[in-house]
Structures are given as structure tokens and as C-alpha cells.
Image (cartoon, coloured by chain):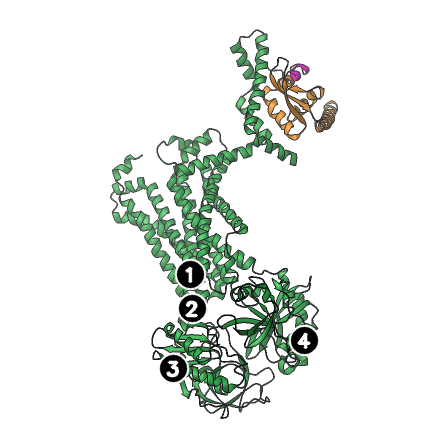
Chain colours: A orange, B green
């Protein structure tokens, strides 16, 4: 069976999480769903691998965690972007854009 | 960075909560996902399976989360510690043996370090003590060298006025007092000092004030500062004593202040201080050397700067006073070096010895660990097979050995407590601050560091070797301990190293022992058996002239000699071997006048007629001293054999004349009437110098009072002590009798420091010897166990008992010989560090080296032979079936 989904390059998961959380606070499952939907299932993210990334971002102080109740009243851990995280997101976004334009340029001209 | 630390800390402290939260979070995710699959029509079991699949390994995710939160490292450490404790508890015998060995090593190190901490690192209780300098005359004359010569008052005065490197300088002169009117009459050691001594030391008083400069003048100087102990013992620690009068040497002194407890300067038994009150004549005297001088350097001035300026001052004084100051330089010595300089080499060498012993201990524990690592091979293999990394395994094993080190450290500190008490009992009396030795924070920190360091040291090699364990093989061979060759070269190397270290420690102990034997057998020049000695100082006021003093000496001699148990009694100005004495330049009649710096120096002493028979000093030529040598008759002297040989090499000295001082001095001529044997005057180590004895009956010149008495008895000398006291008080009821001791005691005090180093070093050497034997024993027993199979085959093939024995023995002895050889070579280089501690032997003393080599070889033979015998008990059939 051929898998058409692509694996995430190293380090981009953090960027995607930050971007997702920039819209609204969300729990882990929500993030994973959102990534699936927006990327039209093109990105292959093993759901479990999301969580170490979340804990790492929390430790760096870019996201904050809060326990709340979900839609069906279950205890869920919500993550939201901190001020430092917002700044980090801008940085990573611009780095990413620079990178992709540069790579594009090379691909088009070479 | 800090917030990161806080985060880690919080997660660590709330570990349980964190685990629960993590469970909840992941569980929530799975439930949601299952919900999605169920909605899309899957049954619950299928939905569960798919959700798990989409998620990945839950336990791995959790582990990664923990790592991401930064709890992993500490978590592992806690696990390792728990596991390590379990392992240590399970192997009680191993743990006990290792702990006891380590405890001895760490305990000895802690005890010696506590001495170093108190004596070398914190010896001076004065503020900015590194600015305090002792200032000595550095006398370099052709026939007299002394770089710590006591300065003359004139030199002190000029130094003080001509330098710009010291904030201030104080002179100190030894003085003793007899205190009367406050309990029994008692002899008290004290000092005459410049008033600024106390401000130089920056010592405050408990009560009262220090001397004023007005009181530092002849005539106004009857004021005194009391030592704290004297104040407590004799004056009930009553502060109102300040301003009152006490009786010293039959004169009235006003107490002006009390010094703090523990203040004794410069000597440990000083209890009284009076102004030194130089006369103008004294301040112009450059030829009579008897002071000690202390200075405080100005801030920012280094010892080298001060030394060079003082050298210039000394050169100027030499030009100004060629007769007295030729060859007289200045030597600065920090007070710290002055106080601890004598003991530093011995303490450092002892520290080196205990450190070496600890290395041997580590070697032995390493061996134990290696042996155990072989037994635990399977455990390691399983862990590696299940995915533990080698780093993880090494970390766990190191945690175990550091735990072991710490356990040894705790027991070691208890041993050190006992050791410190023992050190206090055995230490020589002149070791500074011996009373302050104890377990304090720096010492405990040292023990902690040593324990952890030792744990690391003995654990690192076994840990690495275990982590290289061949997994497949170990798991396959079900019953055999894995890889019999594991660490074989390491073990051999360890035994070689241990034996070598043992050789070094033993050589050190051997050299000290040989020195001690040499010292003890030094011909003293007198017979210390059955001699009682004591001291009486005659106060000037009641004994103002020679006639009064001589009458006392004669009366007391006669009274004591009338006791049936007494053979003879006499007195001298300085008892031998008490590190005190007096020298003078002399002129020999008929010799050409020497150059200014060529005057020969000799020891001179005043004695009563009973002194030579009292000490059993043999009369070699002419006659001794008699009561008939009256002051109005020809002045006479008795010279020592060395003096006779030095000045009258081929003649009989009897009849020749000498005088004190230079040829042009007005001192009277003294006729030599006899020659006596040489005596070690100052201490045991320096060779007897030329010496001359004068009859006390003619002693107008020296001003030295005859003070030390010797009484030769036919029985135990201590028995006559009370009769002696009675005889003294029958003549003069207010005279204190002090320093009552046998001549044997005097000599043992003189030997005390050597005895102390020898005892400690000897103990360490014994431990080292045992450790070396145990190391070999361990190597051989292990090797026999490993080679059982091989031995079985050899026996089955017809090898004799002797062949087997020599096979095993030769392995141990080869290692031992290699170790002994290495040790001897290293010791040959290292023993030079001890040369200042040795007497009568060189640091390369062949007898010591040979003796140590033989001793260790014998120990090696015994240590290897005992375990070798077990090889003979191998049953060939059993050994072969064992596979």
C-alpha cells in the first residue's frame, strides 16, 4: 500500500503546534485533528509524538497548560500560547518562509 | 535558565501528580479518537485497536514526555540509588568487607586532614596574620652560621627606625618570674615585650589596658599583664585585680590588664607580660643577641620587598658597626612559617602516606567489584539485551560504588573521631593548636569529597568492564560465570600497583624507624638513668650577690647529697636537650688576633661541682670544678673534648688560657684545668659543639643564673622528689621548685615529635602491609576459582601437587615481584621528600629498601600460598564435569 502522506521535517512540528494554538487554546487531540484537517491529511503526524513536543514547548515557556472541561464535560488539558510563544511563532514563521523561498528559488532556477 | 530549573523542580516535586496528569491527558486523547472511530461505524474493540495504532506506543510517548519535562536525569538517579541500596543490602558480606576497608582508609585520611586543617591551615588567631613577620639576624660568619639568630637590642632599635616597610616592630625577651603571695610560690614563664606588641598582633584585652610608652622605661616598668589561665587559677578570674599589686621576683608589680583566653605569645606556656623597658645603653648594644622581633608589614608590601629593604638596612649597619655587625644580615620569616615550619614536612608526608593507603584500599575494593561483576555478568547481559544503553549501565554501577564510598565515609568519620582523640593523647606538646583539632565543616566536606572520589575511583574500571560484557555469550552460557578472563589484566595491574604503593609506604615507615633508632642510640654524653632534674630560680632581690647565691647552691647540694638514696647533686645554667643554651665568642691566648668576623663561638655554661658526677659526664684530663674555686682565686674553666680537639689539636689543653669576647676585650683570662666528655647540649640532632664550663663560684660575668638541678640517685629518682622539695623549703620557704622530672622524661620530650611521626607512619605501614597481602590473596583465590577447570585437566593428565602449586604461586609472585621492583624505584625518588625528617640515615638507605623488599616478598608468599592450597583440593572429575 502506497502512503501518500509526507513525514514532517525535523523541528517543524513545534512551528505547526504554535501556529495552531495561535488561533485558540486547544487540547492535544484537538491540535492533532486540526493539523489533519487543515493539511487535508497530507501530513503524517503520529498522534503520540505530539505530546512530548507539547511538554517540551511548555517547559520552554512558549505555551501554557490549563486543565478545563471539554465539550462533553471531560477533564482535558488545554494549551494556549504565551507571550514568549507568540514571539517565537513570528520568528519561526519568518525563518520558515525564508527557507522555503530560498529552496523554491533554487529549485526553479537550477 | 532559572525558570527552566524551577519547572524541573516543580515537576520533580509533584512527580506523582505529573504522572496522573499525563495518564489523564493521554487517556483523554485515546477516548476522543475511539469516539471518532465508533461514530464512523467501527465496533468498540476495533476502534480501540485503531486508536492505539494511530497513537503509537503509549509507554514510549510517556517516557519521551518525561524526558521533555526534564525529570529523566534525576528520575534515573533516584532509581539507581534505590537499586544500588538493594544490591548492597543483598550482598551483605561484600558490603561489610568493602565498607570496613573503606572506612579505615577514609577515617585515617579524615583524622590526618583534621590535624592539617587545624595546624597548617588555621594556625594563627590574629587578624591579617599574613602581614606578621618574625625578623631574625642572618649571621653568616666563617665559623658560625645561623639564619635565625636572636637580634641584639641595638639592631632591633635601628631596624625599627630605619625601615619603611613595617607599620611597627616589637621586641620580645624571655623572662621568668616567681609569683609569691597568691597561693604557693610558683615559677611562671613570661615575656618582656615592647608595648606595641599587642597592637601589632591586634589582640584586645579581657579587662584593663595595655602598657603605655611611659611604662616602657626603666624605673616605670613595674606593670604586668596577666594570662587568662593564670588569672583564673590564681586570682579567681576576678576583674578587680586590675589596678592591684602582685609580687613577682619579690618586687611589686601593678596589674594593668588581662589578655584573652588562649593568648600565649610567643611561647605556649607564657602567662605574664611586662614592658621590656630598654635602657639607652641597651639600645646601643649591637653585640649581645637575645631578642625575638615581630613586625607587621604595611598593607601591600610583599615579603620580598620587605626582605630587600631590610637587607639594605643590614648592609648600612655593617658599615656603621663593623666590629659587631660584620656578617649580620636580616632574615624575614612569616609568623605562619615560624609557627608551623617545623611540623609542616612531617604532616605533609603523613598526609601523603594516608592518601597512598587510601589508594590501596580503592585497589582492593576494585578487585572485589571486579570479582562480583563476573558473578553479575548475566544480570548485565539481560539488561543490555532488553535495551539498556551502556551509558545507563555504567551510570548505575557508578551510583552503586559511590553509595558504597559514602557508606564507608560515614563509618570512616566515626573511626576518625576515635583517631582524633588518640592523636590528641599522643601528639608532641609543641604541636601548635593541637587542642583545636576536631571534626568541623571543612573536615567533613573533605571526608565527603574523599568518599565520593574514592567511590568513583574504585568504581570506574569495573563499571566500564561490565558494560563491555558480550551479551550473546553471557546469555548462552547458562551456569558459568561469564567470561573468566574479564579484567584479568586489570586485576594483575591492580595487584602490581598495590604492592608498589605498599613498598612506598613501608619504605617511609622504615626510614623513620631507622632514624628513630639512630636518635635513641645517639651517645648523649651523660647517663640519664636514675637522674631527677628540677628548676629553681633565685630572685634577685633576696639573692643580690654571688656570695648569697653560692651559699644557697652549696647548702642545697650538701643537704640533698646527705640523703641515703642520693649519690651526687649539682646544677647548671642550661640543662642539656631542652633546646636552650648560650654561646659566646672567645679568644685563645697566644693565637693571632682573628679578623672581625673570625671569632670562634663556643657553648658556655655555669655549673656547680656536683654537676659532672650528677650527670656522669666523664672527666678525661685534669680536674673538675670544686667549691674551692673561689672568686678571688685564679679563674678556671673545664672544656669539652671537642673544644680541646678544636683549639689545641695536638696538645694538652690544661694550663692554656682563654677569655670571652674579642682579643682587645677587658674580660679576664680563664685557665683551663680539665677536659670532660662531649654532651649533646641543645638537642639530640645537632652535633656537640665546643663547650666550656665555669664554676658557679666564680661566675660574675655571664649573668646567667644557675637554675637546673640534677640529682643522681641509687633508686627510682622520682622517689626523692618530695625530699628535695622539703630540703629547698628548709633553706628558703618562698622558693618555687618547678619542672620536676626525670632525665628520661627530658629525653622523651626531646624525642616526642619523632616518636609521634613514627607511630602514625608505622600504623599506616601496617595497614598497607595487610592491604597488600589481602590484594594478593584476592587475586590468587579468584584465579584459582577461574582456573578450576584447567587445574582439573592438568591433574587428570598427571600433574603433581607441586606442579599445580607452583603454577598458581608463580602467578602471584610474578605480580608481587613486579610491584616490589616498581615500588622501590618510585620510593627511591619519593623518599627525598622525607629527607628533612630523617636523622642518621639517608633517604636512599639501602638497609631500609632491602628490608622492605624482603618483608613484602615474604608477605606476598604467604598471601599467595594460602589461597593456592585450595587449588590442590580441586577434584579433577568434578572440575571436568562442571562444563
Q: CA distance from mark 2 to mark 3?
A: 26 Å
Q: Nearer the viewer, residue B624 or B343?
A: B624
Give the mark nearer the N terminus: 4 vs 3.
Answer: 4
Q: Which residues are magenta?
A: A33-43
Asked if A27 appears above or below B474 in the picture, the reply is above
Can you name the residue that lies furthest to the top here? B41
Find out whether the residues at labels 4 and 2 contact each other: C-beta distance under 8 Å: no
Q: Residues within 10 Å of mark 2 (few under 14, many from 20)?
A: some
Q: Residues within 10 Å of mark 3 (few under 14, many from 20)?
A: some
Instruction: Give the percent coordinates (x, y) of residue B458.
Output: 46, 45
Residue B853 appears in which quarter of the rendering?
Answer: bottom left
Q: Which mark is residue B468?
A: none
| Mark 2 lies on residue | B748
Chain to which mark 3 belongs: B
| Mark 1 lies on residue | B759
| Mark 3 lies on residue | B561
User: SS of the residue at dot 3?
Assistant: helix
Classify residue B786 as left or right of residue B204.
left
| Residue B309 covered by magenta stretch | no
Q: CA distance from mark 2 to mark 1?
A: 14 Å
Instruction: Give the percent coordinates (x, y) of residue B810.
Output: 33, 51
User: SS of the residue at dot 2?
Assistant: helix
Q: Tell us which disc is closer to us: 2 or 3.
A: 3
Amino acid at each position: 500500500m502506497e502512503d501518500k502522506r509526507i513525514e514532517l521535517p525535523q523541528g517543524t512540528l513545534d512551528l505547526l503546534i504554535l501556529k495552531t494554538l495561535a488561533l485558540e487554546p486547544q487540547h492535544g487531540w484537538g491540535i492533532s485533528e486540526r493539523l489533519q484537517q487543515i493539511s487535508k491529511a497530507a501530513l503524517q503526524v503520529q498522534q503520540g509524538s505530539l505530546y512530548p513536543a507539547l511538554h517540551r514547548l511548555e517547559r520552554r515557556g512558549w505555551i501554557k497548560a490549563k486543565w478545563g472541561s471539554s465539550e462533553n464535560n471531560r477533564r482535558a488539558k488545554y494549551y494556549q500560547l504565551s507571550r514568549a510563544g507568540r514571539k517565537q511563532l513570528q520568528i519561526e514563521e519568518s525563518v520558515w518562509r525564508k527557507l522555503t523561498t530560498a529552496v523554491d528559488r533554487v529549485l526553479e532556477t537550477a | 535558565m532559572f525558570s527552566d530549573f524551577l519547572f524541573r523542580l516543580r515537576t520533580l516535586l509533584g512527580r506523582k501528580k505529573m504522572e496522573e496528569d499525563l495518564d489523564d491527558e493521554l487517556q483523554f486523547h485515546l477516548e476522543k479518537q475511539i469516539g471518532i472511530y465508533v461514530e464512523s461505524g467501527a465496533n468498540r474493540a476495533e476502534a480501540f485497536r485503531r486508536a492505539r495504532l494511530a497513537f503509537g506506543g503509549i509507554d514510549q510517548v510517556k517516557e519521551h514526555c518525561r524526558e521533555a519535562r526534564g525529570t529523566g536525569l534525576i528520575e534515573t538517579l533516584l532509581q539507581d540509588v534505590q537499586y544500588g541500596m538493594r544490591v548492597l543490602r543483598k550482598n551483605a558480606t561484600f558490603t561489610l568487607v568493602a565498607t570496613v576497608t573503606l572506612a579505615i582508609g577514609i577515617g585515617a585520611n579524615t583524622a590526618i586532614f583534621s590535624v592539617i586543617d587545624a595546624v597548617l591551615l588555621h594556625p594563627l588567631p590574629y587578624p591579617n596574620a599574613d602581614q606578621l613577620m618574625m625578623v631574625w639576624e642572618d649571621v653568616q660568619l666563617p665559623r658560625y652560621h645561623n639564619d635565625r639568630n636572636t637580634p641584639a637590642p641595638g639592631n632591633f632599635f635601628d631596624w625599627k627606625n630605619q625601615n619603611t616597610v613595617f607599620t611597627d616592630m616589637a621586641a620580645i625577651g624571655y623572662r621568668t618570674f616567681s609569683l609569691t603571695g597568691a597561693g604557693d610560690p610558683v615559677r611562671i614563664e613570661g615575656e618582656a615585650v615592647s608595648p606595641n606588641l599587642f597592637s601589632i598582633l591586634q589582640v584586645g584585652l579581657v579587662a584593663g589596658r595595655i602598657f603605655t610608652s611611659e611604662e616602657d622605661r626603666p624605673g616605670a616598668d613595674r606593670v604586668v599583664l596577666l594570662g587568662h589561665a593564670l588569672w583564673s587559677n590564681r586570682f579567681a578570674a576576678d576583674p578587680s585585680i586590675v589596678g592591684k599589686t602582685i609580687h613577682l621576683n619579690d618586687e611589686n608589680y601593678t596589674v594593668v590588664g588581662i589578655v584573652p583566653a588562649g593568648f600565649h605569645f610567643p611561647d605556649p606556656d607564657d602567662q605574664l607580660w611586662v614592658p621590656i623597658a630598654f635602657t639607652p645603653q641597651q639600645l646601643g648594644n649591637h653585640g649581645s643577641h637575645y631578642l625575638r622581633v615581630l613586625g607587621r608589614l604595611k598593607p601591600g608590601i610583599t615579603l620580598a620587598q620587605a626582605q630587600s629593604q631590610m637587607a639594605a638596612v643590614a648592609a648600612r649597619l655593617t658599615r656603621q658597626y663593623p666590629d659587631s655587625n660584620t656578617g649580620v644580615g636580616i632574615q624575614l620569616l612569616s609568623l605562619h612559617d615560624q609557627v608551623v615550619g617545623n611540623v609542616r614536612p612531617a604532616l605533609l608526608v603523613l598526609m601523603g602516606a594516608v592518601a597512598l593507603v587510601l589508594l590501596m584500599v580503592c585497589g582492593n575494593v576494585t578487585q572485589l567489584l571486579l570479582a562480583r561483576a563476573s558473578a553479575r555478568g548475566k544480570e548485565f547481559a539481560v539488561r543490555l539485551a532488553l535495551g539498556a544503553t551502556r551509558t545507563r549501565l555504567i551510570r548505575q554501577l557508578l551510583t552503586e560504588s559511590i553509595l558504597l564510598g559514602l557508606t564507608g565515609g560515614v563509618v570512616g568519620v566515626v573511626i576518625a573521631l576515635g583517631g582524633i582523640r588518640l592523636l590528641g593523647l599522643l601528639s608532641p606538646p609543641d604541636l601548635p593548636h593541637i587542642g583545636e583539632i576536631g571534626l568541623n565543616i571543612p573536615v567533613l566536606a573533605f571526608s565527603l569529597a574523599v568518599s565520593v572520589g574514592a567511590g568513583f575511583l574504585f568504581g570506574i574500571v569495573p563499571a566500564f568492564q561490565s558494560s563491555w560484557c558480550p551479551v550473546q555469550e553471557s546469555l548462552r552460557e547458562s551456569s558459568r560465570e561469564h567470561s573468566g578472563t574479564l579484567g584479568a589484566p586489570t586485576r594483575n595491574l591492580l595487584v602490581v600497583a598495590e604492592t608498589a604503593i605498599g613498598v612506598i609506604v613501608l619504605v617511609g615507615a622504615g626510614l623513620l624507624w631507622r632514624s628513630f633508632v639512630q636518635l635513641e642510640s645517639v651517645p648523649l654524653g651523660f647517663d640519664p638513668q636514675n637522674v631527677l632534674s628540677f628548676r629553681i630560680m633565685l630572685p634577685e632581690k633576696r639573692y643580690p650577690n654571688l656570695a648569697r647565691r653560692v651559699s644557697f647552691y652549696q647548702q642545697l647540694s650538701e643537704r640533698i647529697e646527705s640523703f641515703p638514696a642520693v649519690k651526687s647533686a649539682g646544677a647548671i645554667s642550661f640543662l642539656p636537650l631542652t633546646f636552650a643554651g648560650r654561646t659566646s665568642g672567645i679568644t685563645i691566648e697566644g693565637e693571632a688576633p682573628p679578623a672581625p668576623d673570625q671569632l670562634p663561638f663556643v657553648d658556655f655554661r655555669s655549673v656547680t661541682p656536683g654537676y659532672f658526677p650528677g650527670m656522669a659526664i666523664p672527666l678525661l684530663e685534669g680536674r673538675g670544678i670544686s667549691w674551692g674555686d673561689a672568686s678571688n682565686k685564679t679563674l678556671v674553666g673545664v672544656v669539652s673534648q671537642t673544644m680541646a680537639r678544636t683549639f689545641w689539636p695536638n696538645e694538652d689543653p690544661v694550663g692554656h688560657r682563654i677569655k670571652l669576647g674579642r682579643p682587645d676585650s677587658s674580660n679576664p683570662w680563664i685557665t683551663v684545668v680539665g677536659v670532660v666528655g662531649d654532651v649533646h647540649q641543645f638537642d639530640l640532632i645537632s652535633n656537640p659543639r665546643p663547650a666550656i664550663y665555669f664554676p658557679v663560684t666564680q661566675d660574675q660575668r655571664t649573668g646567667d643564673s644557675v637554675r637546673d638541678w640534677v640529682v643522681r640517685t641509687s633508686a627510682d629518682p622520682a622517689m626523692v622528689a618530695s625530699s628535695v622539695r622539703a630540703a629547698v623549703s628548709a633553706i628558703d620557704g618562698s622558693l618555687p621548685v618547678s619542672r620536676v622530672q626525670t632525665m628520661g622524661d627530658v629525653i622523651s620530650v626531646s624525642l616526642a615529635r619523632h616518636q609521634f611521626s613514627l607511630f602514625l607512619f608505622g600504623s599506616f605501614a601496617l595497614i598497607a602491609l595487610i592491604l597488600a597481602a589481602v590484594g594478593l590473596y584476592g587475586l590468587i583465590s579468584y584465579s584459582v576459582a577461574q582456573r578450576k577447570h584447567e587445574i582439573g585437566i592438568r591433574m587428570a593428565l598427571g600433574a603433581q601437587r607441586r606442579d599445580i602449586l607452583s603454577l598458581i604461586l608463580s602467578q602471584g609472585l610474578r605480580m608481587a615481584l613486579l610491584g616490589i621492583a616498581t615500588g622501590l624505584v618510585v620510593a627511591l625518588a619519593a623518599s627525598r621528600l622525607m629527607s628533612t625528617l630523617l636523622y642518621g640515615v639517608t633517604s636512599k638507605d639501602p638497609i631500609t629498601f632491602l628490608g622492605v623488599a624482603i618483608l613484602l616478598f615474604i608477605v606476598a608468599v604467604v598471601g599467595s600460598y594460602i589461597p593456592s592450597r585450595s587449588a590442590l583440593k580441586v577434584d579433577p572429575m568434578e572440575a571436568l564435569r562442571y562444563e
